[in-house]
Amino acid sequence: MPIYQAPIRDYQFILSELLNIYQYQELAGFEEVDPELVDAILQGVADFTTDIMLPLNSVGDHQGCKLVDGKVITPDGFKDAYKQYVENGWATLTCDPEYGGQGLPEVVGTFATEMKTATNMAFAMYPGLTHGAYSAIHVHGSDALKQKYLSKLVSGEWTGTMNLTESHAGTDLALLRTKAKPLGDDTFAISGEKIFISSGDHDLAENIIHLVLARLPDAPEGVKGISLFAVPKFLVNIDGSLGEANTLAATGLEHKMGIHGNSTCVMLFDNAVGELVGAPHQGLRAMFTMMNQARLGVGIQGLGVSDIAYQNALVYAKDRIQGRALSGVKQAEKAADSILVHGDVRRMLLSQKSFNEGTRALMGQQALWLDQAEREADPVKAKQASALAALFTPIVKGFVTDQGFKACVDAQQVYGGHGYINEWGMEQFVRDIRIAMIYEGTNGVQALDLVGRKLLADKGATLQVWSEMVKQFIGQHSANEQMQPFIAGLMDAAGDLERATGYIAKHAATNPDIVGAASMAYMQLFGISALAWMWARIAATSLAALEKGTDEVSFYQAKLKTGTFYMSYWVSQTRSLRKQIETSSEYIVAFEESDF
Amino acid sequence: MPIYQAPIRDYQFILSELLNIYQYQELAGFEEVDPELVDAILQGVADFTTDIMLPLNSVGDHQGCKLVDGKVITPDGFKDAYKQYVENGWATLTCDPEYGGQGLPEVVGTFATEMKTATNMAFAMYPGLTHGAYSAIHVHGSDALKQKYLSKLVSGEWTGTMNLTESHAGTDLALLRTKAKPLGDDTFAISGEKIFISSGDHDLAENIIHLVLARLPDAPEGVKGISLFAVPKFLVNIDGSLGEANTLAATGLEHKMGIHGNSTCVMLFDNAVGELVGAPHQGLRAMFTMMNQARLGVGIQGLGVSDIAYQNALVYAKDRIQGRALSGVKQAEKAADSILVHGDVRRMLLSQKSFNEGTRALMGQQALWLDQAEREADPVKAKQASALAALFTPIVKGFVTDQGFKACVDAQQVYGGHGYINEWGMEQFVRDIRIAMIYEGTNGVQALDLVGRKLLADKGATLQVWSEMVKQFIGQHSANEQMQPFIAGLMDAAGDLERATGYIAKHAATNPDIVGAASMAYMQLFGISALAWMWARIAATSLAALEKGTDEVSFYQAKLKTGTFYMSYWVSQTRSLRKQIETSSEYIVAFEESDF
């Protein structure tokens, strides 16, 4: 069975040193946050995920969920584990104290989520979706709705879902047909079929609150006619007790490549009673406000699963003896050397390690921006943080899950034939994480979002803000000789990104299809540049720690070496991505349908 | 259910025009080969694979194989399909006529294999492994052994397996422990456990001939002490009839990520009676002589599955309507445009298409070299063809399966959420083809084989032969203006390959570990360059056809457009691969084990 070592030391490094989140005491929720509290929480989650969730990961994969008499039964052990999860309060971390939450910053919650998805992605999705439903109601719901649902969603006693997709309407929600008929008493009768509903039904909680996109009778066509409704599995009485069953049901379970432990349901709403969340016809806007957070959550899956896959591949590479180093015998006492002596095994592991650690730092930065956007008193600061988080959202979701998937495939490759065998656990990681490139907006949609909404829509203003931050960093550190590899790598990546941005801007007006054709390579180029920025900052922080004196010299030196590798191996890709954008985008658009 | 259109027109183009195999009438087996015969065979295989094998592909995935009372039962329909396969003579295509084969060239057989693996990879592995066993006995077996086994293996009435791996000895066969004890009558008692034995047991054929690597009592340590034995499931009487069961059995079936329809067995040999194939202690050499062909077979899997995945993704992209083109509505009569209007969907499909068609041409070239190596009367020509086939073997296996896997992942991505659902068939392609990067030598081993045995061992002599062919081609066509994008792309790739080769050569003597660290990027760079060479040749052939006059103008023009895309999109990657080799290899080696 796969092992897991929660990366607590890395979290401490990011929170205390790299980002120094303890400097934000003036922000709501940060007042009482100190290293001791954060350590206690992260260690508690580490213990729970490693001891309780990890052993259930392969159980969930083997058993999957079952639909029996219209009810979903989760794999053995999930119910007990979820009960403990709720009792321990792990559902409440970042939620509003008014409804029983602990009000902790997102930057802390994000790392808790990483450990959960690393150890059991399918299980972690039950509370993950609940958090989405909580946010939707918290931000957009009426007071009555909040009173009715929030405290139960915060505690985890009830769970939540997001019902967007219909079989003919995935990316294009304008096409959706589910209807909402006013019943005259502030409630609505919801009718329609939704597919791909994660955690749509299960036996973990007493009630499930479905957030459902549907059209009112007077709705304009397209996305401007979509409203959001809260539709409970069981109706809730005024005293908060459960009433009769609503007229909705899971009518099917999808047979998926992975995340078997999570119930992916076909949901049928047959005049089910629901209430509006937010204003009529503003459902898509309500969904969009939660998107940055939801997409960060999916990106975290890419990181978490990539990290546990890496950890296990490293253990295997150290244990497995096979062949001898090309430069001669390294472990004469053994019948063969460990495969960690082989350059290509090291290459794969270093690629994973440098991606994971750089990404973890980026996730911290992104979560901190989300915290600042929500909690900064200064509206200018809040707006800038919000814009930066929006700009980086497609990176955090699209780039990270693409590369996280590849990292899992490489980790599987380290195992040789055993990587293909279920019992070793590696092939499950690959199957599970594959969905992260698809859901919450496919990565192609992320790339379009990056070039369209995030880059061109504000005429590059937010990118400019970030570019200034990068330039400022370079200015501060370019005199430091030890920073040379990092400054050089960062400048190299930033230079290619700038040229690619110019290409995008140039073609946006004349032929936007060309921008679409270039968008994926642009997102990858942006992502590699973003991690180069994080690695340069990690290097500066590590050098400062070494200079100050530390008894963890090897920790900081490993950071510098890993970062140096990143700057050579990963950053070497930016030139080709830029070339690819410049040379192939027009061909892609010009290719005739009949030529395929 | 996935569809399949056998790429017959592309086969004709490659065989008749690009390679013109009909010019080799003086080679054994080519005398009676003409376009009509080849068309008839390919069309026959196309019908059989599409009608019989394809519908069983998902059946095999769902049911898998079962081990009941020590016997493997294959999925429903496999037995009947295999019976037809044998009756139709599809097993005999490239086999020796002396034993009932049709003696056809490998270059024809290779494309038959592509259709088989495309439609049902798991099923195709039963005859695939049989062919390996046939070759081992045909090349290295005694006359008695040939008489005993070959005609039944050729017809497919009996099947074969290759038993190499033990749980502690995968890549490193020096570690293997299976023993062979002489019984004094030219037979041996084989004892040991083998794992990952594809087609190890099944109910498709009366008998299974296991080719087993084992050690004789007087064997030197390491790979120089390994011998090869033929060990039948049922002993064979002098008159060819089946005798008693041998003391061997499948004791377990592996639970795999994919290829569920193929039985991957743990085999236990308990003093099982076997006979030597080839000389004592020369077993590894016997395996090696078949390696080029076996690895071509695995590469073909990468191509075949990538192609069927592409075909289905293209159909889906044309059918699925979702959103509108960035440049405005394209299909006003529909509620949305087909997703083929979106640049990133086109990018994925074009990447797959240009990879598949270039690779198919390369597979033809490789198979032709293997034919020439075996059948050329002139020993100089035969030796050169053999050396070229050996050089390209890691490309054909390693590069093609790596990129073929990525192509399948992209094809799955085109389907959005449906790509993750089993019923649509795409996720099975991804799971099935994943093994091709691992077995028959992991792709890391392929990369080491390329730089070590194929490049450095002959001091680059064979690479030089190929480089001259490339230069000659460039010289012939550089004056042709229409060839400019192809000549430019080919020179670009070849230039990066030359520099990377220089880096490898330079470090080979001082620190071979650095060569290992660079090997994977080098193999990818070599592969992209090899396909650039094929695309340039395809372009020249297509231009010649257009110039000569043809009623298939659109076929040749699509080739030119697809090739132009390849030269921009794929070739843009060579600069970064070269940079990656030059800048990161030393860091990879220098990284301390404790820093991971």
Image (cartoon, coloured by chain):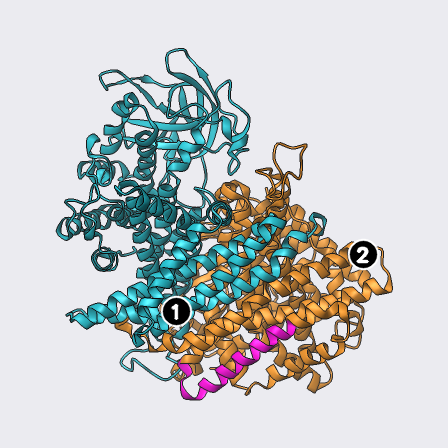
Chain colours: A orange, B cyan
Most prominent secondary structure in the magenta stretch?
Answer: helix
Q: Quadrant of residue B325?
A: bottom left
Q: Which residue, given by chain and number where applicable, does mark 2 sit on?
A: A553
Q: Give A376 or A484, whichever is nearer the viewer.
A: A484
Q: Answer few, some or many: residues within 10 Å of disc 1's Cα (few below 14, many 20 plus, some between 14 and 19).
A: many
Q: Are marks 1 and 2 on the same chain?
A: no
Q: Amino acid at mark 2?
A: Val
Q: Where residue B382 appears, x then y in whole percent? A: 31, 44
Q: Residue B333: where, in percent of width, then height?
A: 26, 80
Q: Closer to the observer: label 1 or label 2?
A: 1
Which of the labelled discs sits on residue B567, or is there none? 1
Vertically, is B137 above or below B32? Answer: above
Few, some or many C-alpha atoms within 10 Å of disc 2 (few <14, some 14-19, many ≥20)?
few
Q: Which residues are magenta?
A: A490-513
- Residue B402 lies left or right of residue A86; in this view the side is left
Q: Chain of mark 1?
A: B
Of the pair B381 and B303, the residue shown nearer to us = B381
In the rendered image, residue A459 lying in the magenta stretch gets the answer no
Q: Is residue A238 visible?
A: no
Residue B409: percent from left, percent from top: 43, 58
